[in-house]
Amino acid sequence: MTAKVTFSLILASLIASTAFAEQTKFMRYIDDETDRIPTLTVAPEYPRIARRDRIEGEVRVCYHVDKKGRPYRVAVRRSSHRIFERPALRAVKASSYKPLEHGEKSSGIKTCRTFRFQLEPVIAENGS
Amino acid sequence: MNLVRTFCLAVLLISGFGPADADADDHAAKTVIGPRNPNLADGAQELLAGNAEEGVRLTRLGLDVAVGQRERNAGLGNMCAGYVMLQQYEQALEYCNQALLENDRNWRARSNRALIFIKLKRYEEAEVDLSRGEEIAPHAKAIKEVRGIYLDATEPVTPNIEIDDRRSEGGKDDS
């Protein structure tokens, strides 16, 4: 489990530092209790309008993962603001898990992922 | 320079030929320049195309022969927008001030002036113009954009997205 989480953290940091370097300065990845190992965790883009209007919120997306590790039946379980739903769904659909090996069976348990969209104040260099 | 123009065009309000913005609440602020003043109309088109120098030149010619308050107010507002595109903020401010002296409810000029104040780091005055503009035209997209620029200048933020894969939240299981 530790190796799985560490791998996910590295992957998440890598994605955060490259693909969304301009949009999202920081991404935190919490835990992983799913029975499938994430191989690619895509972070959603922070919607421009939400950033402009200083809107924060969270979306919980639930889905199944097929044998090849691709999410399917992706649906929003709960969201605080509709503006975040599309980027969250898109991020989940672009993510993937380790495919099942020959003979392995999926537990069939639905996987859920919560995205928290937050705006952190930028601290000026003089600390003000 | 092109980047500055592109940026300015995204938020500046230029009175042109087309129908007035649907989000404008104030009838007096809606401006359609007819063929009676081709220089003013052509100037607006040049500004909308990002050609600030030519836009300002033509608008000035049109302003010299402007008839009526509406035409004059549109011309003044467009001169203001043109000088913002040229990054000549002090001159832009003079034209926006004139436009607002003649029509206090010209929310386009108010939005443009708020942008100038932000550029000049005169944030308190920008806030006053933005608040007044929001009162007059609460749904105007351009004002929302300028409000966003104002907030980025005064209270900058950085987006942070947290991804939480824990199956349950607060003891509740989703599966």
Image: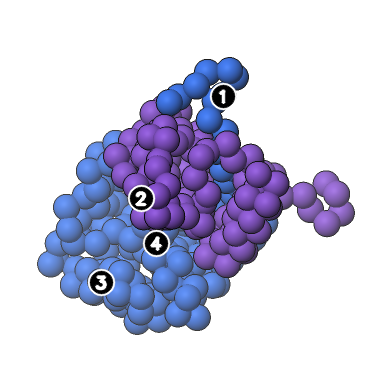
Q: Residue flagged by tag 4: what amino acid is it?
A: Ala
Rendered image quadrant of residue B60: bottom left
Spatial CA span between label 2 and label 4: 46 Å
Looking at the picture, tell me which residue is in the foreground, B114 or B3.
Answer: B3
* Chain hosting mark 2: A
Q: Secondary structure at mark 2?
A: loop
Q: At label 1, which amino acid type do we have?
A: Glu
Tell me if mark 4 has few (under 14), some (14-19) or many (20+) residues whose alpha carbon lies within 10 angstroms of its own.
few
Which residue is at a point 24% across and 62% down the rendered structure image? B16
- From what the image shows, is residue B175 above or below residue B55? above
In contact (CB < 8 Å): disc 1 and disc 2: no
Chain A image colour: purple
Q: Nearer the observer, disc 1 or disc 2?
A: 2
Q: Check disc 1 and report the residue beneath it.
A: B169
Front of the two marks 2 and 3: 2
Pick out the residue farthest to the right. A126
Measure the alpha-carbon separation of dots 1 and 2. 26 Å
Chain B as rendered: colour: blue
- Give the image location of residue A2, x and y in percent: 70, 46
Q: What label sits on residue B45 in the rendered view?
A: 3
Rendered residue at 16%/52% (across/down): B19
Above or below, B119 relative to A63: below
Mark 1, chain letter? B
Q: Which mark is residue B10?
A: 4
Q: Whole-percent x and y of residue B173?
A: 50, 21
Labels 4, 3: front one: 4
- What residue did someone put label 2 on? A67
Q: Are marks 1 and 2 on the same chain?
A: no
